[in-house]
Amino acid sequence: MAKKYEGPAIGIDLGTTYSCVAIWQGQNNRAEIIPNEQGNRTTPSLVAFTDTQRLIGDAAKNQAATNPSNTVFDAKRLIGRKYSDSVVKDDVQLWPFQVISGTDDKPTIVVKYKGKEKRLVPEEISSMVLSKMKEIAGAFLVSPVKNAVITVPAYFNDSQRKATKDAGAIAGLDVMRIINEPTAAGLAYGLQKKSSFAGKRNVFIFDLGGGTFDVSILTIKDDNFKVMATAGDTHLGGEDFDSRMVDHFVKEFKRKHKKDISGNPRALRRLRSACEKAKRTLSFATDTTIEVDALFESTDLCSTITRTRFEELNIDLFKMCMETVERCLEDSKMDKSEIDDVVLVGGSSRIPKVQQLLQDFFNGKELCKGINPDEAVAYGAAVQAALLTEEGIKNVPNLVLMDVAPLSLGWALIRDEMSVVIPRNTTIPVKKTQRYATVKDNQSGVLIEVYEGERARASDNNLLGSFILSGLPLVPRGYPFNVCFAIDENGILTVSAEEKTSGSKNQTTITNKTNRLSAKEIKRLIQEAEIYEVDDMKFKNKVKAMNALDDYLYNMNKRMKDKCVSSKLPPMVQVDINSAIVKGQNLLDGGQKPETFVFVDLLRELKSIFEPAMAKIDNGWTHEDRDEDHGSTTGPAQSIATSTRRKLKEKLSWFNKSS
Ligand code: AMP
């Protein structure tokens, strides 16, 4: 029996461009998408670093054009990959931030944070986005959240899944389960529409997002959700369509203005944002204008693009999507006529040409647009999260979700032959043991190199890791040993090998060490993430203190300009108060970077002086005021003036010292 988790559990769709978080609400019998502090239901998967702070989400996106080299996006395209991977090399060319090859060929992002160079692995960037989603959920639930289900593209390989799990751990999350995005969307669709289903239903999920593309076929019968096949491309999505449009306008700009913007990150970033907006418009309009003021060397970009042109620029990519659709159907051994529903998921599934090609493929079948394509994955993740908690989901207590392994898994035999132990689209969790035999006389060990992929030659596939089964008896070839492959419910693989002779057992487990962070590294990154959080909190507190001081100075200024107030204050006090206001203003506007306490203390001190003075002006003067001046004959205003000035002078001398 699987462990049941205590406390609230959220579902996070960690997207390439946008992320979304949801939680199951038992009382409403539905999952709730949690809006962020800006009220947006999705949050950009961006992290930015500045001289003063780290920004995540909308705040990072809003400043991306002015700080392109320190605004990191697309970490999902890097996660679990090596720097030398051709996909990474191509992407790096297009990004305005720097990526270098780090330890073990791991892509490492280089940014400037608080004036210092900072190197980050993709897991750290993803963990920052996850921590933001955790914070959004915590604010909504008014309590901290720890348990989460995180989704990944169905076609993510073993290292990408493990790296995503590590990112969750760095964000301080207890990752209950990693599930596939189209499966999560299928769960959302099935639960929302189940009441109208009669008998068995075959559902085709078409999930085209910002950076990845997945398709899955699910069979839903009562409370059983079984994935029959999945296929996809972990590097195909809206950003590729944006890139095609960016290329188009870079060329056009060169032609029209004889200016090449391709080496200017700021111009490229601004152009990319404009292209993304234009692309969205072209989903409902047949043409649109694109305008970017002073794009490069004071020259504006002002142009138009038609939907037809956009489609021409991307038609090969759209057709690639259809090939994947076909492959998935073949794998499921189903005919297209057996598909009951074709469900659109992911922001890019809104593109009319994509919809048209898909509809044509399914012989004109009406596509299901009934679920929100941006939110379905998070919705399904929240369902899965709730199912894993002690509370569960009341009306579907026995819901069963069976997923599949997206890629074949095996190991390299002699002459580089791939021996598949778990074929792709096998239902998971699964454990398979196969018997092999030594190929040489007196062979004392076997090198087990584990691969994933569909190619016959092992080295054409993706190497996950290797280990040696040693200690075999020195006997003629043909000596038997077992190799066992196990995939857990997260899609994560463990491989072991053993030989049993005279009771001795030799077993080694592979957990894909090659591309994965070590436990020690994860611990270090968790500590670093905590430091970032403390830094963020410090920054927020400082801004709060500065704002409070700013508000106070503003109100004081206003009161000082009020004739009724100023006429009651002796001129010398007015001068002192006004000079305190100016000094406070200089402190706020100036280049120095005082600590938070300087602002807090100054505000407190100013209040302790101004407020009694103002109260006395508002309420009139008392005998005590007069007495305070030890027999002064100049009247109450002068009495308060003397005491206020004395205090003010003391305080301002302190303030001058500290600033
Ligand atoms: P997702 O990963 O599902 O959040 O999808 C994000 C991608 O969908 C981004 O590349 C968006 O530009 C794209 N997208 C969102 N809305 C539209 C739209 N109306 N037309 C075309 N693409 C869109």
Image (spheres, grey):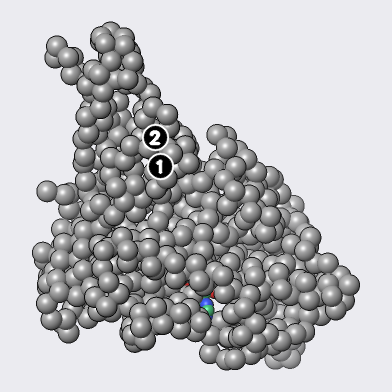
Image location (x, y in percent) of residue 529? 49, 47
Is 147 or 44 nearer to us in this picture? 44
Residue at 35% in and 83% down: 363
Q: Are marks 2 and 1 in contact (CB under 8 Å)?
A: yes
Q: How many marks?
A: 2
Name the kind of residue labelled 1 in the image.
Answer: Ala
Locate residue 507 relative to residue 526 in the image: left or right: left
Specify whether tag 1 is near ligand 1 (CB below 8 Å).
no
Locate residue 389 relative to residue 657 in the image: left or right: left
Residue at 29% in and 47% down: 423
Image location (x, y in percent) of residue 548? 59, 70
Image location (x, y in percent) of residue 511? 35, 35
Answer yes or no: is residue 654 visible: no
Report the residue marked by disc 2.
417
Residue at 77% in and 63% down: 262
| Circle 2 crowding by C-alpha within 10 Å: few under 14, some 14–19, many from 20 | some
Is 344 or 110 nearer to us in this picture? 344
